Image (spheres, grey):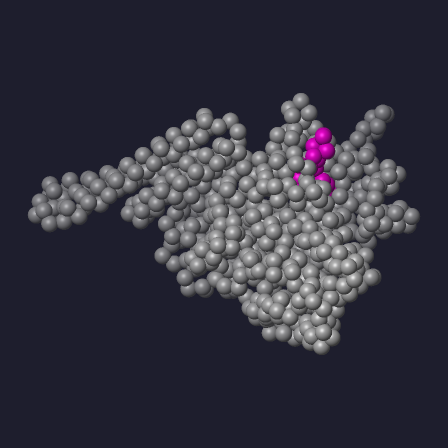
Amino acid sequence: MAKIRFSALEELAGRVPVERKQRPRLAEVYGADVFTMEKMRHYLSVEAFRKLEKIMSEGGAIDRTLADQVAAAMKAWAVEKGATHYTHWFHPLNGATAEKHDSFIDILKDGEVIEAFDGKLLVQQEPDASSFPNGGIRNTFEARGYTAWDPGSPAFINNNTLCIPTVFVAYTGEALDYKTPMLKALSLVDKAAVDVCQYFDKDVRKVIATLGWEQEYFLIDAALFNARPDLKLCGRTLMGHSAAKDQQLEDHYFGAIPERVNAFMDELEYECHRLGIPAKTRHNECAPNQFELAPIFEEANLAVDHNQLLMSTMKRVARHHHFRVLLHEKPFKGINGSGKHNNWSLLTDTGVNLLSPGKNPKSNMQFLVFLVATTKAVLEHEALLKACIVSLGNEHRLGGDEAPPVIMSVFLGRQLDSILDEIEAKVSSRKMSPDEKTELKLNVGKIPEIMRDNTDRNRTSPFAFTGNRFEFRAVGSSANCGGAMIVLNTAVAEQLMAFKRETDALIEKGVKKDEAIFQTLRKYIIDCKKIRFEGNGYSKEWKEEAMRRGLSVDSDCISALKAYMAPKALKLFVGNGIFTERELEARFEIKNEIYLKKLQIESRVLGDLALNHIIPTAIAYQNTLIGNVKGLKEILPDMYAEVGNVQLESIKEISRHINEIRTLVGDMTEARKVANNTYVNEVERAEAYSATVRPYMEKIRYHIDKLELMVDDEMWPLPKYRELLFSK
Ligand code: ADP
Ligand code: MG
C-alpha cells in the first residue's frame, strides 16, 4: 500500500501539467449557455415574449399554446448550440441535483427521425419519485412524481443537455424538493415586505429576497484522495493524526494561490460565467488546501439554483485538474471546516436595499423596521433556524475552529446596538413632544454616518449584520441553501406581517403613523433583546448566558431537528401555507433518515478500515519490533539488558491500542445491531445511532491516530494529513 502512496506522490509532483488557457473575454462568454431573456426575445414572437414576461414578473398560468412556443424557441436555441438531450433539473431532498436526460429524438409514422420537444414536455415530466427521499409521502403503489417548469430560473445547457429548472412534487401534490416551499416563502416575504414598505413609499410594488452565498471547499489531489477510502465513501477523514504544521502560522489565508489551483479556478470561473453564475471572488481560506468562491448576489431562487449548479460544476472541473473537491463541512479534524455563508437581504423594485441605511430619516426608519423585524424573526425561530442547518457533517463543524457556535444569536455591531438602545430609552407610549421627536429623527438620520466607520466584524456570530445585509454563517458547505432560505424568509415575513398588524391597530386608535411605527419598533426592540449578542460566541459564559435567556443550546443534530415538529414551527409553516403538516413531518423524517444512513456508512467504513487496514499494519510492524528484540537478546544480551524494557514497552503499547480498537469496533458493531433490531421507526433509530453508535467513532479514532505516530511511515496504509493537506 505504501507503494501506491509514493507513486501517488510522484504523479502529483510531476505528471499534472499546469495549463493556463487563454480565455475569451468575459463579455463574450457570460451567459453563453443560458437561455436568457434576450435570447428568448430573439427566438419568440413579440406577442409570446410579452405574455411570458408578464407571467414571469406577476405570476399566473402558462397556457398550452405559450408553452409550445417557448418549448420550440428553447429547442431551436439548444439544438443550434449542439444540445442533443433535455432534462428537467430539480433539487430532491437528498441535497443533490437530479436530472433524467431524454434525447430530442422522435420518429414520425413514416420512419423519419426528427428532433422533438413541445410545451407538454417543457411544462411537466414524470420521474419516479420512489428513488428519492420522500419521508413516507409516497406509497409504493403510487410512486409517480411530477416535475414542473419554474420560469423564474432560466434554462441552460450543461453537457450537451438542455436543463430546465423545475419543482418536484409527489403525485398527491406534496412537495418533494427545496424549490416548491422556497418559492412560496419568497412570495410570502414579498407581499409582507411590500405592505410594510407602503408606510414609507407608495411606489413599491415588489420586494425580492437577495442571496449571495460564499462557498468554501477543499481541494485534494486525486491520487491521494483515491487512496483514502474514508474520503471516497464519506467525504471526510475518519482518522488521521494532525500534521505537525497546519494552520498555526496563518500563512494560507489570502496567500498566493498555487498555480495548479489557479488553473482549476480559472476553468471553474469560465464555466460559471458561461452558465450565468456571476462568480466574483476567489481566495485561499484559513486551512491548508481550503478555498472559497463567492458570486455577486442574485435573487434568492436563482442564487440557490446557481449554488447547486456550482457544486456539481466544481466536482466536474476538479477532475480535469486531477483534484477532488471536498464539500463536506469537516473533512479534517482539528482545522477549519467549510461553511456556506448566506448573505441575505431584501430589495425593492424601486432599487432600495431594505437593509441598507438610507439617505434621510424616513428611509432610515424603514431600514430600522426591517433590521429589527429580521432580528425578531431570528429570536422567534432560533431553534428552527438551527434545525434547518444541522446535519451529520455540520455537527462536526459548528462550535469549533472558527465555525459559528451552535447557539443562534444576532450580532448588530456596537453602533446599531446603541441606536436601538436609544430608541428604547426615548420612545414611550405617551405622546412624544415635538422636540423629542425631532431629536430622535435627527439621530435616526445620522445612521449612515455612524455606520460608515462600522468596522465591527464579529466572527463568532452565526447571524451577523454586515453593513447592508445579514450573514447567516451557520449553513453547511454541502447544504442546499434552499433549506435555510425557506425558514429565514418565512420567519421574517411573519414578523413583518405582525409589525404591520400592530402598527395599523395603533393608527386605528388615532396614533399618528410616524409615532405608531416608533412605538411598535420600540416594542420589537425590547422583545428581541434576548437574541442580540455582541460578545464572544465561543465563550463558556455565553453558553451559560444563553441558557439563562432560554435559547436552544442543543448541539447535536438529532435534538436540534426536533424543532421542525414543535408547535411553533407548525404554526409558522402550516399557518402561512408553506408546508402542510404532512410535508413538514416528511421533511423531518428525511433529515433524520439521511443522518442515520450517513452515520451508518461512516461507522461501517471506520470498522472496515480499522480491522482491514490499521490492525494488520500495526501487527506487521509489531512483528518487526518483536524480531528486533529477539535478535537483540540473542546477539547482544548486554544491550538487551539495558534497553530491552523500552522496546518491550513499545510493543506492549501497540498491543494495547490494537486491543482497544478491536474491542471498540466490536462494541460499535453491536450497538448498530441493537439499534437496527430495536427500532423500525427511522427517527427513533437515528436517535439511537446518535446516542449509542456515534460516540465510538472518536474513541476508535483516538487509538488509530496514536498508532499512526508509532508505526513505520513506510508501512502506514493511508496518506496522512500532511500529504493530503500540503500537496497542491
Ligand atoms: P466576506 O467574506 O467579507 O463576508 P465576500 O465578499 O466574500 O465578503 O462575500 C460577500 C457576499 O455578500 C457576496 O456574495 C456578495 O454578493 C453578498 N452580498 C452583498 N450585498 C448583498 C445583498 N444586499 N444581499 C445579498 N447578498 C449580498
Ligand atoms: Mg462573509
Q: Position of residue 691 (x, y in %)?
A: 43, 38
Quadrant of the frame with the N terminus: top left
Q: Is residue 169 visible?
A: yes
Against 372, is 44 above or below?
above
Q: Position of residue 74 (x, y in %)?
A: 80, 44
261 or 426: nearer the eye?
A: 426
Task: Check residue 93 for magenta coloring.
Answer: no
Q: Residue furthest right?
A: 47
569 or 697: nearer the eye?
A: 569
Residues shaded magenta = 164-178
Against 138, is 297 above or below?
below
User: Residue drawn at (35%, 32%), measured in percent from left and top?
Assistant: 666
Q: Position of residue 633 (x, y in %)?
A: 12, 42
Image check: 92 left or right of 548?
right
User: Residue drawn at (61%, 33%), measured in percent from left and top?
Assistant: 135
593 or 201: nearer the eye?
A: 201
Say which quarter of the image contains residue 345: bottom right
Q: Is residue 349 visible?
A: no
Image check: 252 left or right of 202?
left
User: Residue drawn at (45%, 34%), measured in percent from left and top?
Assistant: 688
Q: Position of residue 289 (x, y in %)?
A: 49, 55
Q: Residue furthest top?
A: 141
User: Residue drawn at (43%, 34%), measured in percent from left and top?
Assistant: 604
Image check: 393 left or right of 434?
left
Image check: 542 left or right of 439?
left
Task: Check residue 167 for magenta coloring.
Answer: yes
Tally of numbered tags: 0
